[in-house]
Structure formats: structure tokens, C-alpha cells
Image: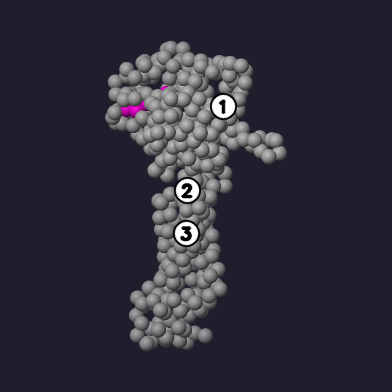
Amino acid sequence: MRLLLLNLLRKPLRTLLTVFGVGVALFLFCFLEIVLAAFNAGVDMSDASRLVVQHKESIIFELPMAYRSLIEQTEGVAGVTTASWFGGLSQEPLANGEKREEFFAQFATDIERYLALYPEIEVPADQLRDLLSDQMGCLLGGKIAERLNKKVGDRLVLRSTIWTQKNSSTIWEFNVRALYTTGSPTFDETMMLIHEKRFDEARQFGRGSVGLYILSIADPERSAEISAAIDARFANSPYETRTMTEKAFNLQFVGMIGNFQFLLRSIGSAVVLTMLLVSANTMMMSARERTREMGILKAIGFTDGHVFLLLIGEALAISLLGALAGVGLAWLLANALHYNPKPDFFPIFYLPGRSMLAAVGLAALTGLLSGVVPATAGMRLSATEALRSV
């Protein structure tokens, strides 16, 4: 171990620059994984026991509210709620008299039923009681409340880009009655829920309709059977349905931007290849410079295996130090400091544990691959040949 450390410190600047290069490459790899996780957050939060019912043609078309009781009668359905996209922008006054607008997800729903379907959402009992008793009330996620600088009891004004009120105003006002948190890192804490009843009574058009139905089923193994039964019930009606798992529903939105995962993975592969070349080049240079030393080590009793392990150990040490720097920085920014460059676009921005393990695994693999050629050459080198070299 001491000999390995001394070899690393032989050319400290070169070692530092190599570690830096590996660290930057792994930091970029982790950042791409963070972005990928952000795009797949909706998919990751999906539950196999939840189904989504939308209009057969497109999500933009509404379904009648009367469908809820019919869906509830379907065998295997345990609970049903609705969700209608509100599409509002917050209206926060600025010191100069202008307004700051923030975009985030808002849904009109039967809040009590919605919370029963999503046990991931945690709401204090007293706040929930106040929320259910106030039709003007709303439920905000902890992160969006922090972004908007709102607390329980505040007033929240939204300008809807879709819905107008009966008085033709697009401005809607709500009372912040409750804030929710969640113990799941993949669950969105930037949503807002409003009462479906107040929304339906106040809007100028679309009364008696909803955007989606979300339902829970007792047996996830029967999801295909139950989906088919629901769609068959409304077949040949003016509002035919398309029922799918929550995961499949969320995958629709990921698919809208094309094969983004392939693009990010390709970039990540290029980054890893660059890291491998940098590390391999350093190890080859280091091995060539120490040909005489390896001959001396063998002459004083070091075996071929010792020389092999020494060179492999150096390559692994450089790669793992780079992993410590690159992965550690990515974890610090995303998971500890909760840095998010685009919170309105990425509601969830964190580095998954599996991505950290993958980055460390890639670093170890890079160390092994970059060290195996010089280590093998050093192992096969005879002491007499090495001592004759200049």
C-alpha cells in the first residue's frame, strides 16, 4: 500500500489532472442520469395497483362525470377519483408593480378520494380537516409552497390558461389550507389540488365533465382484464375510453419527446469512453517510465503477481478517487443541497442510488481496463531486460 501511494505521488500533477478528468467525466455521467431520472419521475412514482381512464381519442377530450359510478361498479375496482388539468399560472405581485408568473401542475379533483388513492401524500390531520371544509381551499406540495413563498392561511391567485369563470374572468383565487409532504423521492411535491365541486360550479364551460379517472384495483395482476372491461362498457358510446396502467399513462408523456433515453445514454457512453482513454493513457505512460524500477522490484524478490497487482491497484485508485470527486459532487448538489437549475420543468431533480452505484462500477471497470495492459506487460517483463533499459 505504501509503495502504491508513493507511485501515485511520483508525478502529483499528472495524477491530480487524471483524477480531475475522471471526476469531471463521472460528474457529467451523473448529471445525465439526474436529467433522465427527472424525465422518468412520473413513471417511477407509478403504482401497479392504479389505473387511468382517459378519452379514447386524446387526453385533451373530457369524459362525463356520470362515468364514475359506472366505473365503480366494475368488478375488481377498489376506489375511483377524478382529475382535471387546471393549467394556471400563479400571479405574484413584484415591487415594480408587475407580476411574477410561475408554472406548476394543478388538478381539480375529489381531494378526499384522491388522497385515499395516493398514500404517498402526507397531510397533517388538522390541515386536512380545514381543507375539506373550505371549497375555496387548496392543497399545495411543500416544494411549490416554498417556491411561491406560501404558507397555510395565505391567499393564492392563479390565471388559468384554459378555464374561465362564469363572469368571464380567468383569475381564480384560492386559500392555502394544507401543505403535503412525501417520503418518496420520486413523488412530485410541486402539485396543487383544488376542489372539483367548486371548480365545476364556477367554470364557464365544460360543466359535468372531467379530464381523467384514476382508480385503484384490488389485484394488480388483473389490470389488463379490468382495463378491457371498463373500455368494453363504454364502447360505441359518444365518449369511448382508453384504460391503462398509471405507468403506461405516464410513459405517453415521456414518449412525446422521442427516444430521449437513448440520446442521453449515448452521450453517457461517449463520456465513459473518454474517461477510459484518459486513464489508460496515464497508466501506459506511468508503466513505461518505471520499467527499470519493475526490474529492480523483481530482482529483490517481488513476484510477477505483485507487479501486476501494483499497477492494477494504481489504475483503480485513480479511477475510484475520480469517482469519489465526481459522484460526490453530483450527490452534494442534487441530493444534499437540492440544487435544481429548472424547477418549473423538473419538479423532481435528484441522483438515484442505482445511478451512483453504476458510476462507481464504471469507475472500477475503467480502472481495471486501463490498468490491465500495462500490468500484464509489467508482469511478463523479465528482470534482466528491465534493468538493461534506459
Mark 2 = which residue?
350
Q: Nearer the viewer, mark 1 or mark 2?
A: 1
Name the residue that disc number 1 marks: 173
**Which residue sits at x=47%, y=20%?**
197
Identified at 56% across, 73% down, the residue is: 13
- State how far apart marks 3 and 2 are (Cα): 13 Å
Report the magenta stretch's main SS: strand
Give the residues in magenta: 213-217
Q: Position of residue 175 (x, y in %)?
A: 52, 29
Seen in the picture, residue 378 relative to 112 is either above or below; the reply is below
Say left or right for 222 vs 285. Answer: left
Q: Nearer the viewer, residue 322 or 274?
A: 322
Coordinates of residue 43 in the picture (x, y in percent):
43, 37
**Residue 215 within the magenta-colored segment of the rendering:** yes
How many residues crowd around disc 2 within 10 Å: few (fewer than 14), some, or many (20 or more)? many
Which residue lies at the image location 44% right of the left edge and 29% below the top edge? Answer: 131
Q: Disc 1 versus disc 3: distance between alpha carbons?
A: 44 Å
Q: Residue at x 46, y 12 (%)?
A: 238
Q: CA distance from mark 1 to mark 2?
A: 32 Å
Residue identified by numbered label 3:
328
SS under mark 2: loop
- Label 1 close to label 3 by CB (< 8 Å): no
**The quadrant where residue 375 appears:** bottom left
177 and 237: which is toward the camera? 177
Q: Is 269 on the left or on the right of 361, as rendered?
A: right
Amino acid marked by disc 2: Tyr
The verdict on residue 95 being magenta is no
Residue 228 screen position, x and y as percent: 35, 22
